[in-house]
Image (cartoon, rainbow, N blue to C red):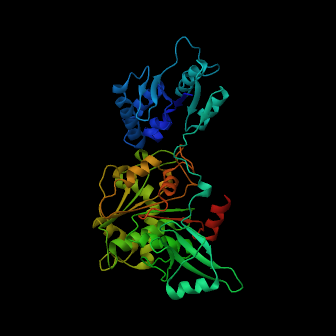
Amino acid sequence: MNKFFILDTNVLIHNPMALYSFSDNTVVIPMTVIEELDHFKSLGDKKGMNSRQALREVDGLIKKGALKTGAKMKNKGTLLISWLDEAVSPPPSLDMGKPDNKILSVGWMWQKRGETVFFISKDLNARIKAEALGIKAADYEKEKVEYASLYKGWIEVGASPEEVQRAYTDGRIEVKGVSPLENQYGLLMNNGATKSSALCKYDPVNKAWVLMRETPDAMGITPINLEQRFAFDALLNDKIKLVTLIGQAGSGKTLIAIACGLLKCIGKDPIYEKMLVARPIMPLGRDIGYLPGTKDQKMSFWMQPIFDNLNFIFSRSGGPAGRQGGSVPSDKIDYLIKSGILEIEALTFIRGRSIPKQFLIIDEAQNLTPHEVKTIVSRAGEGTKIVLTGDPEQIDNPYLDANSNGLTYMVERLKGQGLYGHMLLTKSERSPLASLAAELL
């Protein structure tokens, strides 16, 4: 049975390719949605970029049929551009001066004509109104992941005392009964009378757990729990080109990513030409354009958490290895920025760039859509490593949640890939107060 999916504007802004997500059914775009996309297309941010892309997709279908009567899409579905027929009365008690209500009225019309209608929107309030009108409503869930059961990056493996001991003596051990993924870490644990354990990484070639012997150090920063220990290994492993770190406030995800990136750029054996740190500008109030000053002065407000981490690292580690960086942390940071070794930028300004031979850190990545994360990772040039950090439980983007953001989507899609590593950091190490706030508030 053919179904009619009425798309809200925010769905196409979230993912311009959402047109093709409904199999061989009919996708209806209300004329009001086209008008809103036209309004947003001139913006220089991601909303403008996605609006332009969505309009290009619609325009490309004109050759395949009249949009008024239905154009065939590549997934064998049909696209319709629709509006409320003058012969059909609008839904009762709705202010037709509001764009959301005009969009809902199109779904109301098609349902009155006997079609099976679903209203798809990222806006909770719009979905509530649709249900109140008797129209089935749903969030756009194609790219949703169940955050509560998200891949952690490591597992606890039950082992006998002899197996744990063999891991230390032989450097590796085969443990039956588990099926780890590539680049997954393990805690071999004997819970017997004499407890013992070993930190290991899975080797898919030899199908064995390999002992992790040394505790790493990056710019004077060392791991202080087993999850951080695993994260350090993924960050410092040159064969792993993409790393995601998810954790609550104070878990150390940004700090250890920056420390490892600096080591790989200015350590004894640097392999990257520079480290680029970027964050999406997702304000709770007015955006960067309303702040006073030049671009660099405006950027300092948004990037202060990055500078805080850099100051902490250089206050513990001294200066850049083999380089003159000044006597205080701020001087060392200024030196790295002026010399081009370190670049700190808003994510808006790196779109469209090619990024070769760099250690790229995307902080606060939970505020990105799956489409945006794909766009960023696809910009990686030869020899580049990308690290995405974030906390899906603290999202500022009004159309994303812990299950639908690009960071959790990437974890679910890429787990087990040879070039990919992931770690879920569950313990706050900032302070007892920060830990208490993250857990209870």
Query: Picture coordinates of residue 192 (x, y %)?
Result: 70, 82
Give the farthest residue toward the top: 87
Give the farthest residue toward the bottom: 169
Query: Picture coordinates of residue 375 (x, y %)?
Result: 38, 49
In this rendering, position of residue 378 left or right of residue 253: left
Residue nearest the observer in this picture, 14 or 267: 14
Give the farthest residue toward the left: 339
Residue nearest the observer in this picture, 308 or 126: 126
Residue nearest the observer in this picture, 382 or 13: 382
Residue 95 is at least partly visible in this image = no
- Identify the residue at image location x=53%, y=26%: 103
Vertical position of residue 212 compared to residue 239: above or below: below
When asked about the image quadrant of residue 261, the answer is bottom left
When asked about the image quadrant of residue 336, the answer is bottom left
Residue 65 is at least partly visible in this image = yes
- Identify the residue at image location x=43%, y=45%: 290
Vertical position of residue 101 compared to residue 382: above or below: above
Query: Picture coordinates of residue 257 (x, y %)?
Result: 45, 67
- Identify the residue at image location x=41%, y=26%: 71
Vertical position of residue 283 compared to residue 35: above or below: below
